[in-house]
Amino acid sequence: MKKVGMLLLSLALVVSVLGIASSVSAASHGKQGVLQSVEGYTQHLGELAKHDQEANQLLKEFKALDRVKQEKLIQYLNDPELFRALIEKSNALNAGESVALKNGDVLIRKDLTITVDEGVEEVPDLQATYYRRATYTVTQEIFGLKITKLSSYVRYTHNGYRVTSTYGNGAYVTNYNFGVKITKDVRSHYHTSVRAYSTTIWEGAFARWTPIVVSKEQKVWGTYWNTAGGYLINL
């Protein structure tokens, strides 16, 4: 009887340990952002919404979707090919254009803008130096919800005849696909007499797969005649 008792106790301990290991593993995957369910995505968004206005708006829009679309959205977020498409499909677009995928469920858009730089007031006909900001943005929407946005920009000056300097650049990402980790490496800005340039290297990896699934170079430029351009290419 003692042997049977010890055996049962040993089995109970094994089951207990396995249960703990399973819980730890699940928690670890959760921290990595692997999407398991509609409920998990809602909970994660809810946590972000406490201090992120965009997440709060997205949470409202996600809850407004019917259950079928919610589950489909989770499937799309877990599809590495759709994340690759954000990069690869956008490069063929002109500024302001978009392409629809998955029967219109997924939309990828490209925007190029040129603006007067923040905090600068210009006086028409009296301005000797013009301060500009050129921005290149790609966006992925699913069922109308803005999920991922990558933007690069360069800040520069021109005198109406040539680019005279660059004085800043950067990149930022808005990403509510918790199944993918996106990192950036912003390179130095520079200019010629015609254009001002900035380059950003983007890398994206899914929590479920290694190594990196995308590695891209995004280049943006602005001109002295106030236009913006750019490209996104494989590395």
Image: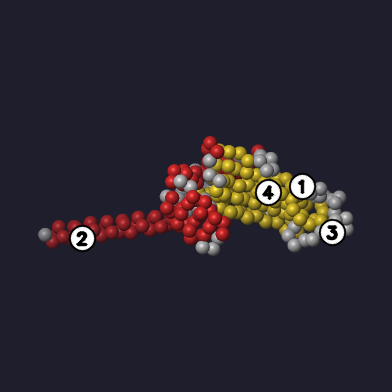
Secondary structure under the numbered disc 3 in the rendered image: loop
Closer to the N terminus: mark 1 or mark 3? 3
Task: Tell me, for residue 136, which label it has, or none.
Answer: 4
The residue identified by callout 2 is: 9
Asked which secondary structure carries label 4, the reply is: strand
Question: In front of the other: label 1 or label 2?
Answer: 1
Residue drawn at (52%, 51%), measured in percent from left and top?
A: 61
Q: Residue at x 51, y 63 (%)?
A: 50
- Residue hosting label 1: 227
Residue 123 shows which numbered tag? Answer: 3
Give the amino acid at mark 4. Answer: Tyr
What is the number of the mark on residue 217?
none
User: Which scheme is used to colour this image of the protein?
Assistant: secondary structure
Residue 190 visible in the current orientation: no
Of tags 3 and 4, the one toward the viewer is 3
Give the crowd class for mark 4: few <14, some 14-19, many >=20 residues within 10 Å.
many
Query: Amino acid type of disc 3?
Result: Val
